[in-house]
Image (tube, rainbow, N blue to C red):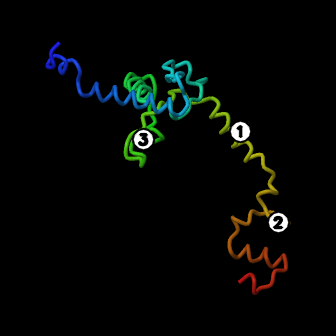
Amino acid sequence: PSEEEIRKLVLPEDCCAFYSMQYAEQRLKDAGYGKSIKNVSDDEDEDDSEKILDDEVRIAPWNLTRTFFNALRGKCQLEINGIADPTGVSEGYSYLRVPNKPSIKGSKEKVEKVEKKSAEPKSTRTVMGTDSDLRRLTLKTARGVLRDFKIPEEKIN
């Protein structure tokens, strides 16, 4: 083929994508990933049990491109801000995959945290010897509590 035919077949965008892919692949190999560079799975069923991948693999151009096209098809949602932001100062878009279904594991952890907070004994929220939470006392009431503990007036004012 002539040079003109090659220029029609190979667009500048294709060259940029190819060189970007080569650069990312070499960067992953240099980081120690070797020949076992994984792709992020497309299966919707794996949202709950998706293996945790290193950030370097998740931000590889082929994974970001795949997640972008999956989001266009409605298969997943995209994280707009995050580690894959090319500017590094939150002026670009991250395009990392966020599952459509909420994570069961994450919601269980949130529920457990709330239950632990509500299960705390009342004594941890109050000062020993009082029935109240001193953070919620008015200034007048707080002064009265200090006087009950026989704190000198010079220190109270």
Q: Name the residue under label 1.
A: 112
Report if the CB atoms under discs 3 and 1 are less than 8 Å apart.
no
Q: In which quarter of the image is the N terminus?
A: top left
Q: What crowding class fits label 1: few (fewer than 14 Cα within 10 Å), some (14-19), or many (20 or more)?
A: few
Q: Mark 2 points at which residue?
A: 130
| Residue 79 vertical placement versus 68 (above, below) | below
Circle 1/circle 2 CB separation < 8 Å = no
Residue receiving disc 3: 85
Question: What residue is shown at x 65% (from left), y 39% (from top)?
Answer: 110
Element on which disc 2 rests:
loop
Left/right placement of residue 29 relative to residue 110 reads: left
Looking at the rendered structure, the kind of residue marked 1 is Glu
Closest to the observer: 88 or 128? 88
Q: Could you tell me residue 69's position as x and y percent?
A: 38, 24
Q: Residues within 10 Å of mark 3 (few under 14, many from 20)?
A: some
Which quadrant holds residue 19?
top left
Q: Could you say which quadrant of the image residue 11 lies in?
A: top left
